[in-house]
Image (cartoon, rainbow, N blue to C red):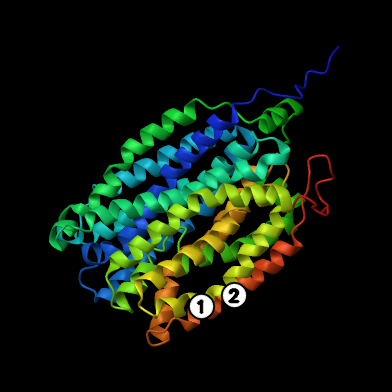
Amino acid sequence: MTDNIDASPPRTPMGRVAFASFIGALLEWYDFFVFGTASAVAFGPLFFPNQNPLNGIMGAFAIFGVGFLARPLGGVVFGHIGDRIGRKAGLIMTLLIIGLGTFLIGLLPTWHQAGIAAPILLLVLRLVQGFGLGGEYAGAALITIEHAPEGRRGFWGGMPQAAASAGILLATLVFALLDGLPKSEFLAWGWRVPFLISIAFTLIGLFIRLNLLETPDFKKLQQQGMSDVPPLAQLLRDHPGNIMLAFGARLAETISSNSIISSNSINAFGIAYIVSQLAMNRSVGLNAMMVASLIGIPMCPVFGALSDRFGRRAVYLGGAGFMAAFSYPFFLLLGTKSVAIIWLAFILAYNLGPTMMFAVEATFFSELFGAGTRYTGLSIAYQVSAIIGGFMPLIGTWFIKLDGGQPWLIAAFLLGISVLSFVCAMAARRVTDKSPSRHWYPARVL
């Protein structure tokens, strides 16, 4: 009798997989970035009108950060679904949760319409967004990485990562188009537009994802038989060292992206710093971020391809090292108040810092876990570290207050975190499904 395990399960063509993963992830990231931008430019006066402007922004940033608290829970729930039911099932669920949550934010009453109920409802929907995004990242990455040929996983794995830059670009562009509205009209109805149009994006993404095949890696896992141990317990039993190292390695990316440039909220802190501390028009930061994000879209697959040639670890270390070196110069360049120099600062910091790390992050981290725990491991490493990054707009604003309007405390913090991540990335070791999973192995491809 022949072996009933199919050594080569059918694959969706890579172009279709990459497009579906990119478009779906783009819509998810757009939804989340819109909240970050609105926190900086609208939510303060709309939901915290009785506070002074800086405290109102901090209140909005606090709700922005609280959404990250729900992400590890989403990572555990959807990690279990992705490792036991399928990568595709997790992707479809997260798309619906985030899309509907974002749409409903656009329908919320403000403080003047509902009083204290308004920020409470905003908080609830923010938690819904965070819960959904907790499982989105790993699913979008794995649906592509596990379809890709072994020697090209870095390149193809960079495709859905590019959706982060595209999501920033799209969200920033929508707000930039609305920037021409009189302030009274923007606060009356304009801020709702980016949230409401997300329903169309959600339907498009849902249609695309429903037409994907399950990944070959997961099909092989099903045919070989699932472990009776829940994925989270199996992960903590078999890979405790790698999960901690992945968490530490990821800190530089999430903190840099959320404190001075962007992956989730340049619009939340960086633009707020330019407006409140440098007294410049917010369009300067918005335009700089649009250009940096546009460049970041093709850079993700480029960095991914470089990781296929030189190793995931080498590329990731390059991003962490650059961020450590550029933490102080970034704010010095902003302090010149030159539009051209500010643009240059955003482009360099965004693309050679968090984008370089983020481009190879999913492939790098996924190779630290076996197929049976990969969705859970990738989700946990990413989402637990995201909690710190999610509160960086709030922490950064607090640092600014402590330092009398100067950015040097946050620059020092970023420098220290980048060094920590560099060390953790150096220490992480690849495991394979062919190796005893409780041991670490030198990672030639990492």
**Quadrant assignment, res 9:** top right
**Quadrant assignment, res 273:** bottom left
Q: Position of residue 149 (x, y in %)?
A: 69, 35
Q: Residue at x 78, y 44 (%)?
A: 432
Residue 376 in sight in this render: yes
Question: Which quadrant holds the N terminus?
Answer: top right
Question: For this rendering, which residue is in front, 18 or 189?
Answer: 18
Q: Residue at x 24, y 77 (%)?
A: 52
Which residue is at the far bottom?
Answer: 404
What crowding class fits label 1: few (fewer than 14 Cα within 10 Å), some (14-19), or many (20 or more)?
few
Q: Position of residue 272 (x, y in %)?
A: 34, 70
Q: Residue at x 53, y 75 (%)?
A: 327
Seen in the image, is 22 located left or right of residue 313? left
Is label 1 in contact with label 2 (beta carbons under 8 Å)?
A: yes
Task: State the residue position of label 2.
Answer: 325
Seen in the picture, residue 370 relative to 337 is either above or below; the reply is: above
What crowding class fits label 2: few (fewer than 14 Cα within 10 Å), some (14-19), or many (20 or more)?
some
As helix, strand or loop, the secondary structure at mark 2 comes to helix
Marks 1 and 2 sit apart, C-alpha to C-alpha, by 8 Å
Question: For this rendering, which residue is in front, 413 or 44?
Answer: 413
Task: State the residue position of label 1.
Answer: 329
As helix, strand or loop, the secondary structure at mark 1 comes to helix
Which residue is at the far front?
Answer: 340
Q: Amino acid at mark 1?
A: Pro
Residue 267 in sight in this render: no
Q: Position of residue 203 (x, y in %)?
A: 37, 32
